[in-house]
Amino acid sequence: MELFWYIVLMTMLAIYVILDGYDFGAGIIHLFFAKKEKDKKAITNAIGPFWDANEVWLIASGGVLFFAFPTLYASSFSGFYLPLIIILWLLIFRAIGLELRGQIHNKIWEAIWDKAFGIASLLLALFFGVALGNVVRGVNLGNVVDGVSTHEAHYFFLPLWNPSFSPHAEELGIIDWFTLLLGIIGVIALTIHGANWIIFKTNSDINEKLKKVIFNLNIVLVVLVILSLLVWHIIEPHPFHNFIDMPWLWIFPIITFTGLFGLFKVKSFKKHGLGFLFSTLFLFGGLTSTVASIFPKVLPSTNSINPDLTLYNVAADEYGLSVGVYWFAIAVVLVAIYMVIQYKVFKGKMDNVGYGEH
């Protein structure tokens, strides 16, 4: 049952990254590339009917984490308290940036909330990438100091950064050069993803410009992905051991690079949805490849005193996990019905939706 709920949780997180990821990316595009009012409206129209529903996947993932893996929930929500609070505020500002902009038709008012929406989207993409970097790198479980565990084995707490900015320091920080690298990859990948969504859902004049942006950013993304794979050896001496032991896992890196290299053809795509498909493949493949590389760990320990947190030592009781399957089946049906209706109602181009106009 632990493996079943682990797959459920990772699937929900992947769906969240793909769906709310294009919202973050659209916000970044809005911040840097939308200079005209009609371009800004096209972007908000493209995500307006979807963004709040997409965020529900994050809440639902947190609920599954609390139910199925309570020890991991307690550990991560205390250890990552500072960035989680920052993410909460960024989610708030992104939402009110969308909702309040159209309340008053004044250039200063609109400029303030445009910046709030764009900057919050950018920082959210960065922090979620950094969060993935922390999971890959591991944390100092038990807050070990000079070889002595000062807290319970599953407890830790991280400041935003440490003086050395190093992923090998005994007292780790949320942000170091390795986690920041993954954060930058997250920003670029979601910017590409958001641009593909805008192209897919609008006929905006900005779309041709976005195709060039995607192509150029994809070059940077390829370089950074290769760099991250090389420096991964500095963090984990044997980062690909799971892929060697279980060759079928190579399907996930194949999906990743299929999406990555497919994006280079974005300028020639006749169907506007193909770019979004390839960026989705990259995000899904990248996330699942990362998860597969550390399996069965869910939060590695950077010290030798306390063991890694794995899906087996953080899971809830077998009876509770089994009973939850029935409720989960009902939830899946309801969510599927909702999403089918939502995307059917708002299918096609969204240029004339008029989101945020009051």
Image (cartoon, rainbow, N blue to C red):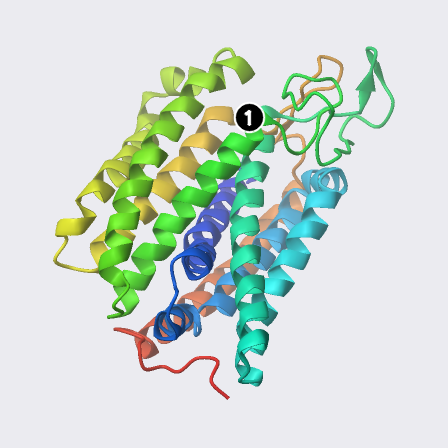
Rendered location of residue 271, percent (x, y): 15, 59
Looking at the image, can residue 326 be seen?
A: no
Compared across the picture, whether 185 is left or right of 344 comes to right
Q: Residue furthest bottom?
A: 358
Give the residue number, with chain letter if any, for mark 1: 178
Compared across the picture, whether 153 is left or right of 48 comes to right
Q: Quadrant of the N terminus?
A: top right
Task: Tell how many labels.
Answer: 1
Label 1: how many residues lie within 10 Å, few (<14), some (14-19) or many (20+)?
many
Quadrant of residue 139 within the rendered picture: top right
Q: Secondary structure at mark 1?
A: helix
Q: Amino acid at mark 1?
A: Phe
Q: Which residue is at 68% across, 38% downward?
A: 72
Q: Which residue is at 46% across, 59% downward?
A: 31
Q: Residue furthest front?
A: 108
Compared across the picture, whether 170 is left or right of 218 comes to right
Q: Which residue is at 62% across, 64% downward?
A: 93
Compared across the picture, whether 201 is left or right of 294 comes to left
Rendered location of residue 345, percent (x, y): 33, 79
Quadrant of residue 156 within the rendered picture: top right
Rendered location of residue 101, percent (x, y): 55, 76
